[in-house]
Image (tube, rainbow, N blue to C red):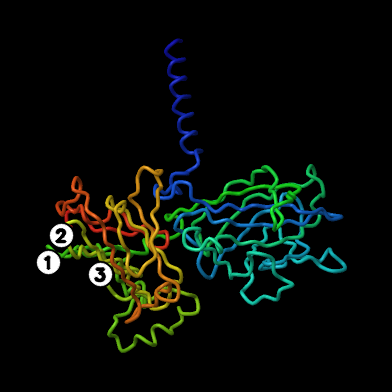
Amino acid sequence: MAVVSASAAACCAVLLAAVLLFSAPATTEAYDSLDPNGNITIKWDIISWTPDGYVATVTMFNYQQFRHISAPGWQLGWSWAKKEVIWSMVGAMATEQGDCSKFKRSPPHCCKKEPNIVDLLPGTPFNQQIANCCKAGVIRTFNQDPANAASSFQISVGVAGNTNRTVKVPKMFTLKAPGPGYTCGRAIVGMPTKFYSSDGRRATQALMTWDVACTYSQFLAQKTPTCCVSLSSFYNDTTANCPTCSCGCQNNVTHPGSCVNDNSPYLRSAINGPGKITGQPLVQCTPHMCPIKIHWHVKLNYKDYWRVKVTITNLNYRMNYSDWNLVAQHPNFDSTTKVFSFNYKPLTPYGDGINDTAIFWGRKFYNDVLKQAGPLGNAQSEVLMRKDSETFTLDKGWAFPRRVYFNGDSCVMPSPDSYP
């Protein structure tokens, strides 16, 4: 009898472990060690009650160090807890109205159970705008452009209840930017947001506030990487090229038209082909098939300094990268002396004690737009760093970066055994 009990207990323990394993949230996929606290926070502030609901201001704050939302912009969705409708919106719009046939007079702006909201375009009439709206859904990072690191809209909700007890928090928030990649948690009711007057002498507060945090996973965003890294140096003729098939392999049998040679007589017609309307990438045919290639070249070795040249090449014939950024990790970044042609800012993801990560981005009206593939489709800069006599060496690949990101996505590095 005791043997049976022990066996049953062991079976229950195994079953419980399996349940815990498969029911645990897969949070590690969205964790990035270079931006451990990065997320997009959605703040929903109820600012007034109406006869059948409320008016709220919804703001998305980009708290990510180096990942922005680029064109064609964000799409925000959720599921209503009851039978709410959207009477009107300012600064954004629902993509579909849905079935509003039960409303006999003025129909609501949107009656869908799961509305999908998008930002308005620049140039929207002023009476349809609020602060931080109408940027076509583009949200920059605080590091590059803090004035444009948030996006807001105002929403009037009906059939919702008009007290703190009767209002129900929406569920199942989704954020596309513009495709998949973000996973949003549940809305959490928190302390009401305070709003200060322009002179800072008076504060008002929201009637009710809830927050939603959305985190990014490169694995969810795309099946393949989007960039790769090649390495070279002045002291060795060898170049460590981007690994073959880093971002996919050439296969004109199953995926015809996925790439084109730069000297092809059909280049112009391929660029203007059917994929241009849908935004389908058209990359230059290369062994690595990446739309973005970053090259790190150890250029010079002085007595007290050393110099690196970084080149970013756009190999996508159908896309310009506006307000791009590059993040690299190297132990000697704490002694950066001068950066030519790029803006530069140190990142300290591990606290103030370690400064081995840097973000670079283009200078406004000079090289902040990485043009599509071609003669102008590159940007380059040089970085001058002071040597640390205790750590500096040109042996065993020390002079090369540990990790490289472009626009927030990790790039494929060459194998260490191929380093010059």
**Rendering quarter of residue 338:** bottom left
Up-down relation of residue 332 to residue 133 (above or below)? above
Camera-side residue of 49 and 241: 49
Where is residue 110 shown, x and y percent of the image?
74, 64
Camera-side residue of 108 and 273: 108
> What amino acid type is highlighted by mark number 2?
Pro
Horizontal side of 417 relative to 1 (left or right) equals left
Where is residue 124 shown, x and y percent of the image?
67, 75
Identify which residue is drawn at 84% across, 69% down. 106
Q: Which of marks 3 and 1 is nearer the N terminus?
A: 1
- Gap between marks 1 and 2 measured at Cα: 8 Å
Q: Residue 420 carries which label?
A: 2
Camera-side residue of 131 and 48: 131
Give the residue number, with chain letter if any, for mark 1.
237
Query: Do tag 1 and tag 2 residues touch (Cβ < 8 Å)?
Result: yes
> What amino acid type is highlighted by mark number 1?
Asp
Horizontal side of 380 relative to 135 (left or right) equals left
Element assignment for label 2: loop
Element assignment for label 1: strand
Question: Looking at the figure, which quarter contains the C terminus?
Answer: bottom left
Q: Which mark is residue 287?
A: 3
Q: Earlier in the sequence, mark 1 or mark 2?
A: 1
